[in-house]
Image (cartoon, rainbow, N blue to C red):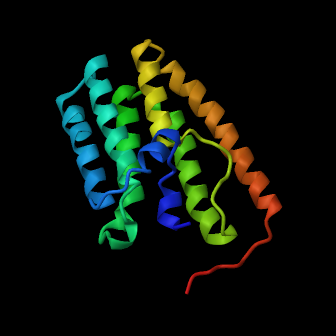
């Protein structure tokens, strides 16, 4: 499987939406997915309805972007970065104070994803919900008024899961050396 596709860290929603094949460049769809979030963030505080609309737009377009051809997209290298920017910015927007523990866990996950592919030749295999599932869960926590505490709990749970998965996968695989040219 394509490394850039694995680095997307897609969840179940993006996997389903990604079955829709199209000719639009994935990077363009992702840019269109995160622009409304950037505008909403610039406007200030999030209401439940505005957050739902912005995150739904991001999840739908971001998921559909999986169905595009990464091989023909000149900016395919930007796809994982656009997903990270959209996800991280949305989490900070929903809970500026509470997002930090969750962001630390996600940064570790994405670091392990890149370096697991590079050095072990395999991406993390334990489920993480994907960027799309985490955004839906984040909105649900926001809508029921469970933030910032919900992000602290989620960050702790995901952080423990990601570290355990990383340790287990490194113990199970023989080092392949540095593939750097």
> Residue 103: in sight, yes or no?
yes
**Quarter of the figure that contains the C terminus:** bottom right
Q: Residue at x 39, y 26 (%)?
A: 95
**Quarter of the figure that contains the N terminus:** bottom right
- Marker count (numbered): 0
As drawn, the residue found furthest toward the bottom would be 181
Q: Position of residue 35 (x, y in %)?
A: 22, 44
User: From the viewer's perspective, is 111 left or right of 157?
Assistant: left
Q: Position of residue 72 (x, y in %)?
A: 33, 72
Q: Nearer the viewer, residue 109 or 11?
A: 11
Q: Which of 91 and 11 is in front in this view?
A: 11
> Residue 85: in sight, yes or no?
no
Q: Where is residue 49 in the image (x, y as percent from the top left)?
A: 27, 19
For residue 25, what is the image quadrant? bottom left
Q: Residue at x 62, y 36 (%)?
A: 158
Up-down: is 135 above or below 165? above
Q: Position of residue 102 (x, y in %)?
A: 52, 35
For residue 45, what is the image quadrant? top left
Up-down: is 55 above or below 148? below
């Amino acid at each position: 499987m394509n490394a850039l596709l694995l680095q997307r860290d897609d969840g179940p929603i993006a996997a389903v939406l990604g079955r829709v094949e199209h000719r639009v460049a994935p990077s363009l769809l992702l840019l269109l997915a995160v622009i409304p979030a950037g505008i909403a963030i610039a406007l200030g505080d999030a209401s439940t309805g505005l957050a739902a609309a912005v995150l739904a737009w991001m999840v739908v377009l971001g998921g559909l972007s999986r169905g595009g051809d990464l091989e023909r997209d000149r900016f395919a290298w930007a796809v994982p970065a656009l997903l990270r920017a959209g996800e991280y910015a949305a989490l900070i927007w929903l809970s500026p104070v509470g997002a930090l523990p969750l962001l630390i866990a996600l940064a570790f996950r994405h670091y392990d994803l890149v370096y697991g592919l590079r050095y072990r030749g395999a991406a993390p295999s334990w489920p993480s919900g994907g960027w799309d599932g985490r955004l839906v869960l984040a909105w649900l926590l926001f809508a029921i008024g469970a933030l910032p505490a919900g992000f602290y709990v989620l960050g702790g749970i995901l952080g423990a899961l990601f570290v355990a998965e990383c340790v287990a996968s490194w113990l199970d695989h023989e080092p392949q050396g540095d593939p750097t040219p």
